[in-house]
Image (tube, rainbow, N blue to C red):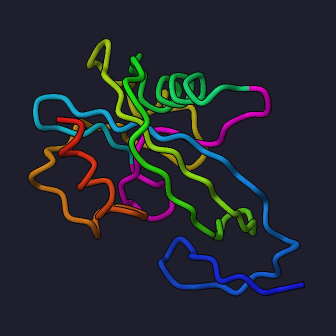
Amino acid sequence: MSIVECIALDGHLKAVQSDRLILRPAAYALIVQDGKLLLLKMRHTGKYHLPGGGIQIGERMEETLKRETREETGVEIQVVRFVHFEEIFFYYDPSDRAYHGLHFYFICRPKMLRLLPDDHVVDGSAEQPRWVEIRNLQPEDFQSHGDVVLALCKQAA
């Protein structure tokens, strides 16, 4: 059994035995409209992340994107194209679980712009859906992969 270094919510590395890792494929929506990016905040850190999440067994990635974006933001989307893949090992402190994440990023277009009220967000770790000015964002504003997300915004504009 080997040890894998996972990134924790606070950005520090945590050593985890490989047999504890849970394989978690996930799809994330990059939705840009009028110079703004649709983002949520992590409940536990206040950092930004994209709408999206874990792909359920038997669910296509496009279905995941539509379901997760609707649950987290209230926005209905059209999936345009796949743009990026990231592999990440992360430790989710609140549940004491470690993941081998396979993250697929897609450019999507909103079919409408109205967001859910904060108290209607259906997600245990995400809150406060907002349209955020891209020009005001820095990589460190994101829970992870902020540099990647900001670079991808140029492709989505």
Q: Position of residue 101 (x, y in %)?
A: 63, 58
Q: Position of residue 128 (x, y in %)?
A: 37, 41
Q: Which corner quadrant of the image does residue 89 belong to? A: bottom right
The residue lying furthest to the top in this view is: 111
Q: Across the whole image, how many numbered discs are drawn on residues?
A: 0
Q: Position of residue 21 (x, y in %)?
A: 79, 67
The residue at 23%/45% (across/down) is 153
Q: Which corner quadrant of the image does residue 107 belong to? A: top left
The residue at 46%/55% (across/down) is 42
Q: Position of residue 82 (x, y in %)?
A: 43, 36
Of residues 120 and 68, the one nearer the viewer is 68
Q: Is residue 112 left or right of residue 137?
A: right
Q: Is residue 93 left or right of residue 107?
A: right
Q: Is residue 3 left or right of residue 55?
A: right
Give the answer, above or below, for where 135 lies relative to 27: below
* Residue 75 shown in magenta: no
Report the magenta residues as a range: 41-58
The residue at 75%/66% (across/down) is 97
Of residues 117 and 3, the one nearer the viewer is 3
Q: Is residue 49 left or right of residue 61?
A: left
Q: Quadrant of the C terminus?
A: top left
Magenta: main secondary structure equals: loop
Q: Quadrant of the N terminus?
A: bottom right
The residue at 48%/23% (across/down) is 70
Give the answer, above or below, for where 112 lies relative to 51: above
* Residue 49 shown in magenta: yes
